[in-house]
Amino acid sequence: MNKKRYILSRIAFICSILFLVSCDTTNSSEESEEQLIERAIGIHDRTITLDTHDDISLANFTETRNYTMDLPTQVDLPKMESGGLDVAWLVVFVGQGPLTQDGYARAHQAAMDKFNAIHWFAEEKAPDRIELAYTSDDVRRISESGKKVAMIAIENAYPVGTNLDNIRKFHELGGRYMSLAHNGHSQFSDSNTGERDGVWLYNGLSDLGRQAIAEMNRWGIMIDISHPSKEAIMEMLEISQAPVIASHSAARALSDVSRNLDDEQLMALKNNGGVVQTVALRRYVDAEKEASHRQAQQALYREIAGDLGFELLDRGTLRGMSQEDRESYQAKMAELREIAAPREESEVNSVAPPVNVSDLVDQIDYMVELIGLEHVGISSDFDGGGGVYGWNDASETFNVTLELVRRGYTEDEISAIWSGNLLRVLDEVQQIAQEIQNAK
C-alpha cells in the first residue's frame, strides 16, 4: 500500500490544508509546520483509513456513469485515491415505508438492486481498483495490494420484512452491519424520530426485533445503533451477545440532536465493548454553529436568488415537483452557488464560521475522554448529508489525520481510531457468530 502517489501529485492540496493552522491544537513540540505536515503524511500513508458510512445512488452504478469516474459525488474512486481513503462502507439503504407485506417486498427488491450494484462495480467494473471485503483480514490484504476496499452496510432492516432468513441472506451478500430502524418506526424497532411527536410503537424493540438481534449475532452482522430510539438502543446493548456499533453518530452532550448518543448510551456502549463512529455531519457535530452558518448563507442565497428572479424552495416543496421542474430548479441553484462562491468567505464564513474538521475532532476528543480511545472511530455520511469544512469529500481525508496529529494523538492511536477499533469489533462479532453456530 502506497499513498505517496496522491501526495506527490497534489502539492497544491497539501498547501491548502494550512487553513487548519488557526484551529485550536494541543501540539506543543518544536517541529515546524512543514515537519508536522510531513509527519502527518507518513502516518496517513501507513494507516488504513476506514469510513463506515457512504450512501450510494443506483444512478452512479452504470456503464456510462460510475465510481471509476470523478463524479459530482463526495465518494468515488478518484477521490478515494487522491485523498488516501482506503475503505468505504457502501450503504444499502431503503427508506422506511408501510409495515405491510407489499411494503416489505418493494423494500427487499430495492435493497437487492443496491447489493447487486455494489457487487457489479467491485467484481465486474473495477476489480483492478477496488475489492469487496468480508473480514478484517480481507481489509488488510486488499489494502496491502494497493487496491481500495468496499464493504457493505445495511441502513434500515425494513427490507428484511418478517422473514428472518433474509438476515442470513444479507450476510451472504456481504452485509456486515445493519440498523434495525431508520427515520421512522420499523417492524423491529422504534426510531429516534419518535422524539418529535412522542409517538412510539413498542417503547423500544418489538418481539421480532429481539429475534432479529439473535439472528444478527448468529450470522455475524454488527448491530448498528445509529438510528433507533434510546429505549431500543439500551435494550440492544443489554441483549446482544456481541459488541455493537454506532455507524454514524456523535455525542449529544456537544450537539443536542436525537440521532446523537447521550453519555448514558455512550457508557453502555463502552461496557458492551462497542465503538461509535464519529460522524462528520455538520448539525450532529455542532448544531448551533451549523444553524448560525446556514442562516448567514441563506441570507446571501436569498439576495442572489432575488437578483436572478427565482424563489428558494424547501425540500418538501421540491419533492412534490415534477422531475422536469426539479431539474430546472437545481440548474438555477447551481448557477446561484457559482455566483455566491466568491462572496461566501467574506460574507458568510467570516461572520458565521462553518462546522469544520477541528469541530469534528472536538467530538472525537470528548468521546475518547469519556469512554476511552478504543471505543471511538470515524465516519462521514458522505452523499447522505455528511461533510464538514475541510473534509467535505473523500479527497480531503488527509485533513482529519492532520488534525488528529495536531491534537497529539500517536500513530497507534490514530490507526485505532481510523480502522483498528471498528475491525476489532467486526472480529469479535464474527468470532461470537462462529461460537453460536458451533454450539448448535
Image: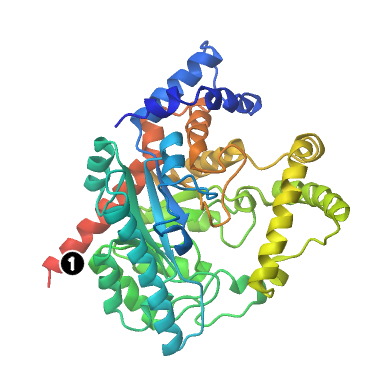
Residue 243 visible: no
Please name whichever residue, 336 or 258, is drawn nearer the observer in this view of the structure.
Answer: 336
Residue 382 visible: yes
In the picture, the quarter occupied by the C terminus is: bottom left
Please name whichever residue, 367 or 329, is drawn nearer the observer in this view of the structure.
Answer: 329
Where residue 160 appears, as percent x and y from the top left, is: 36, 77
Please name whichever residue, 436 or 336, is drawn nearer the observer in this view of the structure.
Answer: 336
Q: Is 175 placed left or right of 196 in the picture?
A: left
**Dot 1: element:** helix
Where residue 236 appears, as percent x and y from the top left, is: 40, 68
Identity of the residue drawn at 74% across and 56% down = 332
For the rendered model, the colour scheme is rainbow
The quarter holding residue 104 reads bottom left
Please name whichever residue, 152 or 208, is drawn nearer the observer in this view of the structure.
Answer: 152
Identity of the residue drawn at 27% across and 49% down = 127
Rendered position, 355 above or below 330: above
Q: Is 92 placed left or right of 97 in the picture?
A: left
Rendered position, 217 above or below 262: below
Q: Residue furthest bottom?
A: 101
Residue labelled with disc 1: 436
Identity of the residue drawn at 46% across and 54% down = 54
The quarter holding residue 193 reads bottom right
In the picture, the quarter occupied by the N terminus is: top left
Where residue 88 appears, as percent x and y from the top left, is: 39, 49
Amino acid under disc 1: Ile
Rendered position, 358 above or below 323: above
